[in-house]
Image (tube, coloured by chain):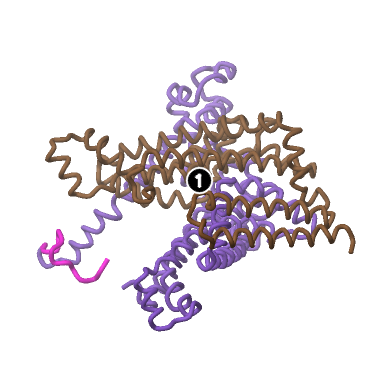
Amino acid sequence: MSGGMILVVFALILWAAGWALNARLAHGPVSQTRAAQIAVPVIFGLTLIAMWELIVRGLAVPGVILPAPSAIAATFVAQAGTLWEDFVQTFVKGALSGFVIGCLAAFAFAILADRTEFLRRGILPVGNFMAALPIVGTAPILVMWFGFDWHSKAAVVVVMVFFPMLVNTVAGLADTSAMQRDLMRTYGAGYFQTLVKLRLPAAMPFIFNGLKISTTLALIGAIVAEFFGSPIRGVGFRISTSVGQLALDMVWAEIVVAALAGTLFYGAVAALEKRVTFWHPSHRH
Amino acid sequence: MSNTAPLAAQGAGVGRSGRVALWARGFSRGLAPVLTVVAAILALWYLACIPMNAPQSVLTASRADIAVDPESPSDRRGMSGTALALRNPGVALSYAYVQDRPKLPAPHQVSVELWNSTAVLAPTSPRSLIYHAWVTLSATALGFAIGTGLGILLAVGIVHSRVMDMSVMPWAIISQTIPIIAIAPMIIVVLYSVGIQGLIPKAVISAYLSFFPVIVGMVKGLRSPDSMQLDLLRTYGAKKSEMFWKLRLPSSMPYLFASLKIGFAASLVGAIVGELPTGASAGLGARLLAGSYYGQTIQIWSALFAAAILAALSVGLIGALERVLLRRMGMQQ
């Protein structure tokens, strides 16, 4: 048996071992503990990465098709400066600023629209319809309007996150029962008191749902908009040029950056949600 | 809405025209607010065209020897569209909706282009939007089928295997926080280098985007039967497979359809984005890209609306299928 095949067989053995370990953890007495719930997916992920490395080496897959994880890690370390520059351009300047502007605008608009029943009835279906449309398609138009730099990327993000956020906030503000509102009225609470003390807290699960959807949309919008023109930095720009140069290790390093940014962003919003909506059934243990 | 008039509803007792009153009530509760919002959006759009297109309008007018306010072009360069429109209201208004490459085309210009490129041109013409929509739709449908199949299979595995639930589910969630679009160019290049091109790479991206809503919805749906129902089947001596086919699968249908609608919209986005980095010559994404290269704004907007109409029609079709199927299964009256 050649050396390559031994590595592939070893990868399969590793897979079986990882799966067996996970099966023991999942069915054993420790399965309900927090540690096991984290350990099982981590073991699964590590097994996959190890298999990837072994199979790429064992079958001698060329780097232009699939680079090994070690090669990606090496590029990640060696190109850290470039990656950081791209991260700042795409995530901090494009996605984050667009996310903040878009979510705040949708929130303010929802509060205004919520004051009349008529507007609310009109905005919900239209907003739901718009949220289902392929809004990324506006990227070429917005790049034309706002230029190649991060402003156009932020604009695409604003348009993309606006409708999911609007629909969720409007639906959330309507999510109080007549009994609860009557109680506020018997307390003599005015519109603003009812809004701040009852309806906004009640809307928080919906608002955070919108925010969580928007985190992924924001990154997608910022990256896709770079395909339509960008200055010579940014995750989307680097991906499309590196693909052209067949430098796939660089592409994967950028994907790692995007994945880390996306996961941390989502995680941050989810952690905030846990603190704000601690009273909601889905967060009680 | 039901055909019989609810006795205790507002307007139900208006004279003998219960049906008309009900219709009027339904209109004022349902359709009228939506139409108002749509009309407001259209009005804002028409209004926005004037300042957006003002620089071009003023330039065209000055070339046609019509007096415009800052006479020299160098004075006009630094001015915003709004300022130009305010100082030359007549010119800005009369040229706003007739330009060939407006910065913001008016709704009627987009509709005319849509009509011309769908109804007037033959569907086989490379300029016909029906042709491009078909190219995108076929990739979307293939990817959607792959993604849905994979999502259902994984969901069945997750519901029946605790190991899979604990190890795969977190990764499925994490995979969605990654902007998958970032991988699109690479998928296309890698598949090309192993000899696969055309429909499949786009379908792969579509499949990746659509599998997640399906997996989440199906896991929820397959777990939706409560313990009472499961216990009942157990007392009947049902096997695991019978429990799946007779209880879990039927009760997951409403969840499946809700996910299918989201999944289809996602896979359409996937197919469109999949056409961007390759410089594909056909498809709605290619149409967007070509329009942005040549500054053909009307073409971009009509491709965008074609994509929107395609999404709306497909999601409507899935909704109709859902109603028929659920009614035949006796889950909805």
Tell me, yes or no, if residue B311 can be seen here. Answer: no
> A183 or A155, which lies in front?
A183
Which element type, helix, strand or loop, lies under badge 1? Answer: helix
Few, some or many residues within 10 Å of mark 1 (<14, 14–19, 20+): some
Furthest residue toward front: A29
Q: Is residue B305 above or below residue A207?
A: below
Q: What stretch of residues is rendered in magenta?
A: B1-14
Q: Position of residue A13 (x, y in %)?
A: 74, 61
Name the residue at 10% across, 64% down: B15
- Identify the residue under disc 1: B109
Residue A123 versus residue B51 in the image, above or below: below
Secondary structure predominantly adopted by residues drawn in magenta: loop
Q: Residue at x 42, y 52 (%)?
A: A129
Q: In which quadrant is the N terminus of chain A drawn?
A: bottom right
- Chain that appears purple: B
> Residue at the location (38% across, 46% down)?
A168
